[in-house]
Amino acid sequence: MAYDKQNIFAKILRGEMPCIKVYEDKYTLAFMDIMPQADGHTLVIPKVEAETLFELPNSYYGPCFETLKKVGNALKKAFNTEGVMMFQLSGEQAGQTVPHLHFHLLPSSIQTLRNTRHAAEMADQEKLKEIAQRIVDALEE
C-alpha cells in the first residue's frame, strides 16, 4: 500500500495544517494531540514517509527514540510525575487512525486516562497551548 501524502500529519510536516508544537529537530516533530486522552498527551512523528513502525528507515529509529526520551522527560517535569505512558499503533487493525507513524506520550497511567477510546473528543485549543508551553519550559530547563 502506498503512503498517503494527504494524511493530516504529512500536511502538518509540509506546513499546510497547523499544530501546537513542543519540539522539533531534523528528524522528528513533537506536538499536542488535539484529541487528548490526558492532559499533556503529546505525539512524536518522524519527518519521513512511513505509515507504520515497519516502514520506518533504520536511520530514523535512533532520532525518534531520542525525541521520545527528551519529550518524555519534559512531561515528567511539567506534570510532576514519574509515570509516562508511551504507545504506538501500527496499522488500522491495531487502532491506528492516521496513516503516518506516530508515538503517543501521556504523563499518566492507564487508570487516569480521560477517555478509554482513542481520538474521542476535541480539546480546547487555548488549554492545549498552555499545556504545550509547560512542556516547552520543561524542555528548556
Image (cartoon, rainbow, N blue to C red):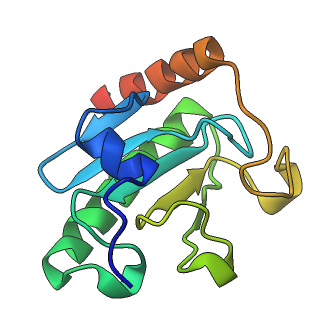
Q: In the rendered image of this protein, does residue 16 appear above or below residue 65?
A: above
Q: In the rendered image of this protein, does residue 133 appear above or below residue 8?
A: above
Q: Nearer the viewer, residue 49 or 109?
A: 49
Residue 27 appears at what percent x and percent y? 17, 56
Asked whether, in this view, residue 20 is left or right of residue 125, the answer is left
Q: Residue at x 58, y 74 (%)?
A: 89
Q: Quadrant of residue 88?
A: bottom right
Residue 53 appears at what percent x and percent y? 40, 80
Q: Nearer the viewer, residue 97 or 35?
A: 97
Q: In the rendered image of this protein, does residue 122 appear above or below residue 71?
A: above
Q: Quadrant of the N terminus?
A: bottom left
Residue 31 appears at what percent x and percent y? 43, 38
Q: Residue at x 32, y 67 (%)?
A: 65
Asked whether, in this view, residue 65 is left or right of residue 84, the answer is left
Q: Nearer the viewer, residue 48 or 59?
A: 48
Q: Nearer the viewer, residue 9 or 104?
A: 9
Residue 22 appears at what percent x and percent y? 37, 32
